[in-house]
Image: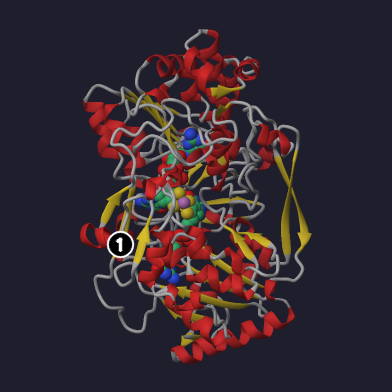
Amino acid sequence: MKRVGEKGKGIFTRITWDEALDTIAAKFKEIAADNPQAIQPYSYAGTMGLVQGESMDRRFFHKLGASLLDRTICASAGAAGYKATIGLSMGTDPERFHEAKLILIWGSNPITSNVHLWPRILEAQRNGAKIIAIDPYRSLTAEKCNQHIAPLPGTDGALALAMMHVIIKENLIDADYIEKYTLGFELLRERALEYPPAKVAQITGLDETTIINLAREYATTKPSIIRLNYGMQRHAGGGMAVRTVACLPALIGSWRDAAGGMLLSTSGTFGMNTTALARPDLIWNNPRTINMSALGDALTGFQRVQTFNAKGAPTETLEPLDPPVRAIYVYNTNPVAVAPDSRKVIAGFKREDLFTVVHEIFQTDTADYADILLPATTQLEQWDVHRAYGHMYVVLNQPAIEPIGEAKPNSEVFRLLAERMGFTDDCFKDSDEELIRQAISSPNPRMQGITLEELKEKGWQRLNVPERFAPFAEGNFPTPSGKCEFFSETLAKQGIDPLPVYITPRETVLDAPQLARKYPLAVISPPAHNFLNSSFANLPSFLKAEKEPHLDIHPNDAGLRGIKDGDRVRIFNDRGDFKAKARVTDKARSGVVVALSVWWKKLSGDGCNANDVTSQGLTDLGAAATFYDALVEV
Ligand SMILES: Nc1nc2c(c(=O)[nH]1)N[C@H]1C(S)=C(S)[C@@H](COP(=O)(O)OP(=O)(O)OC[C@H]3O[C@@H](n4cnc5c(=O)[nH]c(N)nc54)[C@H](O)[C@@H]3O)O[C@H]1N2
Ligand SMILES: Nc1nc2c(c(=O)[nH]1)N[C@H]1C(S)=C(S)[C@@H](COP(=O)(O)OP(=O)(O)OC[C@H]3O[C@@H](n4cnc5c(=O)[nH]c(N)nc54)[C@H](O)[C@@H]3O)O[C@H]1N2
Ligand SMILES: [Mo]
């Protein structure tokens, strides 16, 4: 379809695929003749399949010479933080959780967002394990745990350092493991001594005894696992927070047990041949990279440049973006709803001189701003192969039905565009099945035995890892030193504190007192139970279940503002505002309000959602979005 109405109104007229593709190719040729870097690909996790998510699309934009995209909207802070300590996103097998005796669910809400892990956790609980949630919000998961510890958002790094303080002072460490398999313990010890529980109680808003007991229980119950996840990452110090928490298992030697250690993501266990898929060798012009979490800036003419202080706390300046973005091609993502600082994002998409292509299954908030809107197939209609971040299986996605209507898979559209652009390299002719073969043909030992034939037969294959996978039982950390790095030379070289350190959030009452006078409440907006980011947030059954946007607010905070349960409230800061129905509840700890997300703006009642108040500030490590680091008034 092509746009006939004003940008954002979503009024289109139907055209043929030929006309659509010719229009896009003509526009790209015109811009590329000037400078192809003015063309911006923009994609994320609509499908996480390798074929439809990171193959023909990457080849196309590499060959074109378009700007690159740093895909930071979700996991890059945690990945970078974990890498600094452990080396690679690899950890405990989710299928061992039922054997643990203590599980810390830290910044994660598995009942909603990791459904296949939850039964294992329940089984552990039935076997007598204690389950502790560490979360500022009493989530569905926290409600079912044996204990819920509710720190202020973004203070997890301090909490972990205080735990280390107790563990080291009370000699609850595994000295043998530390000696053989870790680097920098003496320095870590000195650092941890700077974080006594009394001091950290002030930072986190927890009782000193809660912190001490948590540390003791964690260190003395065997095996104990930490399921750490995204909640703690979405703050200015999110990368360092993950790096810090990731030191804990080595300190007490819990990696020795297949049901010990920790799980952030299993993605690094997979060794898919993503290079063969994306073909970075096709890049010829050393293009710039745009950070996807600062899309609002990019579309309005700016690039965010980060600098760090000696600890590694980030500050950012805006520099003019030259050339400006003249065309954007959006697929597998819905940035108008999910990217931070919506007003800037929308101001960008409204630009009359911006050429916008959106390839979608539904007419999303973002689709409404398209100049050309293309129909996409769903996973039911397309080939793909998946790795995972929450299990150990390679999964084949075979189409169950023919494409409906005129919908086409991402891979096919890029093949057709490549042809129109005159890209003659053979790699633009690869079929989806050929792409799958390339993805799984990898020298990585964990990929040995994975074949398309067996995948077709079974649908899935477990990675070539032992049933009782205990990757770091005897060290073998994939870090530069081969050890768990309490001290990181790599960080030191980047001018960042080589030891774990607490990096404060950008926007909290304690750390930004001036801002807090105007906006005294921290807002977090984790996934609503029935939505998948913004996917499914338009389907009638799920909308019925979620009813309308809500804001959970503690009785004290509600009382101070004369807010009663069921009142319609406005949540605002200098960036913007959105409206929701107040639920006065102690599920939100005092000082923190919770807006479960991600609502489509056009279905939310006021055309806005939680991202109207979130910021484009980036994390320390990984330059990720800081969705849960925002102050507001209600
Ligand atoms: N149903 C459903 N499932 C999903 C998704 C979805 O949208 N819906 N999204 C998928 C995606 S893309 C992702 S990335 C994952 C995300 O899934 P999770 O890893 O579970 O991450 P979140 O839901 O963002 O946050 C988890 C919990 O962290 C808490 N939290 C917020 N800030 C902090 C903090 O500073 N410290 C601590 N300790 N906790 C904090 C939140 O209150 C929340 O209960 O889920 C995936 N699965
Ligand atoms: N306030 C707030 N904002 C958040 C978050 C939060 O917790 N709070 N979570 C953040 C996180 S963790 C993430 S990962 C991002 C996720 O953000 P996105 O990656 O944008 O995920 P979705 O919002 O689910 O949008 C994916 C879109 O892809 C489309 N799609 C699905 N399959 C295909 C396909 O095969 N082809 C094409 N062309 N399109 C397809 C879907 O219809 C959907 O509209 O959002 C982030 N934004
Ligand atoms: Mo995500």
* Residue 339, position as x, y percentages in the image: 55, 58
**Residue that numbered label 1 is attached to:** 452
The picture quadrant where one finds residue 254 is top left
Q: Is residue 583 visible?
A: no
Looking at this view, name the residue that lies furthest to the top.
170
Q: Residue at x 72, y 71 (%)?
A: 324
Q: Is residue 251 above or below residue 468?
A: above
The picture quadrant where one finds residue 450 is bottom left
Q: Residue at x 49, y 61 (%)?
A: 44
* Residue 27, position as x, y percentages in the image: 62, 85
- In this picture, residue 70 sits left or right of residue 12: right
- Color scheme of the displayed model: secondary structure
* Residue 384, position as x, y percentages in the image: 36, 65
Q: How many marks?
A: 1
Q: How dense is the environment of label 1, judged by Cα within 10 Å: few (below 14), some, or many (20 and up)?
A: many
The CB of the residue at mark 1 lies under 8 Å from ligand 2: no
Of residues 127 and 363, the one drawn nearer to the viewer in this rendering: 127
The picture quadrant where one finds residue 392 is top left
Q: Is residue 395 above or below residue 141?
A: below
- In this picture, residue 380 sits left or right of residue 177: left
Q: Is residue 470 above or below residue 581?
A: above
Q: Residue at x 33, y 33 (%)?
A: 143
Q: Secondary structure at mark 1?
A: helix
Three-letter amino acid code of the residue under disc 1:
Leu
Of residues 378 and 159, the one drawn nearer to the viewer in this rendering: 378
Q: Is residue 151 visible?
A: yes
* Residue 31, position as x, y percentages in the image: 68, 81
- In this picture, residue 386 sits left or right of residue 88: left
Q: Is residue 392 above or below residue 383?
A: above
Of residues 527 and 272, the one drawn nearer to the viewer in this rendering: 272
